[in-house]
Amino acid sequence: MIDLFGPPRRYFDARTLPLMTRPSFRWELRSAMAFPFAMAALESGVVGVIAKKTFDADKLIVAAVAAAPMVANLTSLVWARLLVGKNRVRAVAVLQSLVIACVALIALAPVNAAGVWMLVTLVYLGRSFVAGLVTARSDVWRSNYPRSLRASIVGRYASIIALIISVSAAVIGGVLQVTKTHDVFAFRAMYIGCALIALIGVWAMSHVRWRGGPAQLKLEHAGLASDVRGQFGARGMLEVLRDDPHYRAYMAAQFVLGMSAMAGLAPFIIAVDEDLHLGYAWAITLTQVAPTLLTVITIPMWARLLNRVHIVRFRSWHAWLFVAANATTALGLGVASVPLLLLGRIVLGMGYGGGRLAWNLGHHDFAPRHLATLYMGIHVTLTGVRGAIASFLGVLLYAGWNFKIGGATYHYSGMKEWLFVLLAFVSWIASLMFLRLRRDMRRANPTATDA
């Protein structure tokens, strides 16, 4: 068994893995140590704070930035079709390059109204490319790593990526905090630096081998492609949801849990700036650094669990962390306690650790191999749908609204910290949905011991 709790050297040591997986692991590990610098520059907890503080963006712009990672997933409908017949490793490298280009262009955005829209556009474009590489990379992982070790191997990557994103975010927040009157110049320098380092990751990724890839591409090009390409659209996705009731129920529970997880970020960014008046360093620490560090710490634990159990059983336990995180955040905002908010973000980070693995790998427990990309496409697309709703709904419920229609004024003062009480309740509903699905799957297949 892979010892993810051993010395750091073993964590990076390919000799702890089966012989056939080692070459791919070494190259992808190098990529995972460099490319996340670009990803950090697109993280909502970083760019959302920059949009609010450096660009003085309004609340709905912050909501749009927070929603970007999820909304961009709607492009998976396009990526799933485009990837049919394409070398997945090459596709990942190309998409990584495009992400880096977006980060470099963000550094050039002017600090004015036009610059705000340029920032938002590039964030969405960059996150769309990330959605594409996530879809492509899932096929590579399925082919290169056996099921019994996949979560642990991917967990290594996820931990390293999360750690680098966390460190990068902390550096960006610290530099902007100490260069207050020159934060625009510092922001540009940090983003250009992140883009340059990330290029090393593209070079490393281009050396990864896709085991079984040529055979898969041959099938896709020799007649199967027309059938598969037809499936990789709205009709194919709807057919899967119609014909696979367990995956349909899993997606429903995921949708509810995702709403509770996504709706809180933009309001939290607004709260730490407007209500608690925290500076760059504390704001980015709470929004990005603390959750990401706990993601790093807890991924090994989640990987070991996910190696052994079905994703539904995993989620039936894991979802409760979002209940606790939202409840603690509500209390922290209610009493204006930074330590309590930090505790809430720590618990949320623990949830993110399991969620990152489950999001990338969970569909494999339902999908036939030749439809794995389609199943992932469904998951990613529904993530985009709830992301398009959750962030804006969260901001409106938190901050309220005031508008006129036909001479009548409609005003709502907002829920403030009570929003997070509502999100805790929604998370609780999701946990019950996973428990019900687990029961239904065991009834349908009594011999399944890990569902």
Image (cartoon, helix red, strand yellow):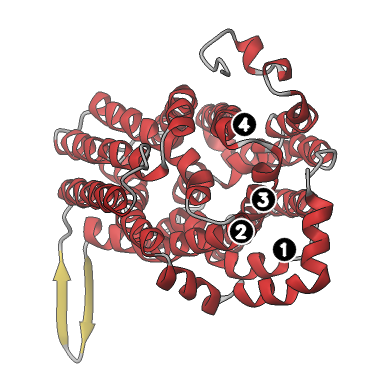
Q: Quadrant of the N terminus?
A: top right
Tell me whether the residue at label 3 lies in contact with that at label 2, contact meaning CB atoms closer than 8 angstroms.
yes
Res 430 seen here: yes
> Residue at coordinates 71% horizontally, 39% vertically from top-left?
144
Mark on residue 83?
1
- Residue 382's place in the image compared with 428, above or below, is below
Mark on residue 139?
3
Tell me whether the residue at label 1 lies in contact with that at label 4, contact meaning CB atoms closer than 8 angstroms.
no
> Residue at coordinates 51% horizontally, 71% vertically from top-left?
237
Amino acid identity at mark 3:
Asp
User: Residue placed farthest to the front in the image?
Assistant: 447
- Looking at the rendered image, the disc whose residue lies closer to the viewer, 4 or 3, is 3
* Circle 4: element type: helix
Which one is earlier in the sequence, the residue at label 1 or at label 4?
1
* Circle 2: element type: helix
Q: Viewed as shown, does residue 258 lie left or right of 300?
A: left
Tell me whether the residue at label 3 lies in contact with that at label 1, contact meaning CB atoms closer than 8 angstroms.
yes
Which one is earlier in the sequence, the residue at label 1 or at label 2?
1
Across and down, in percent, residue 40 comes to: 59, 39
Q: Nearer the viewer, residue 384 or 54?
A: 384
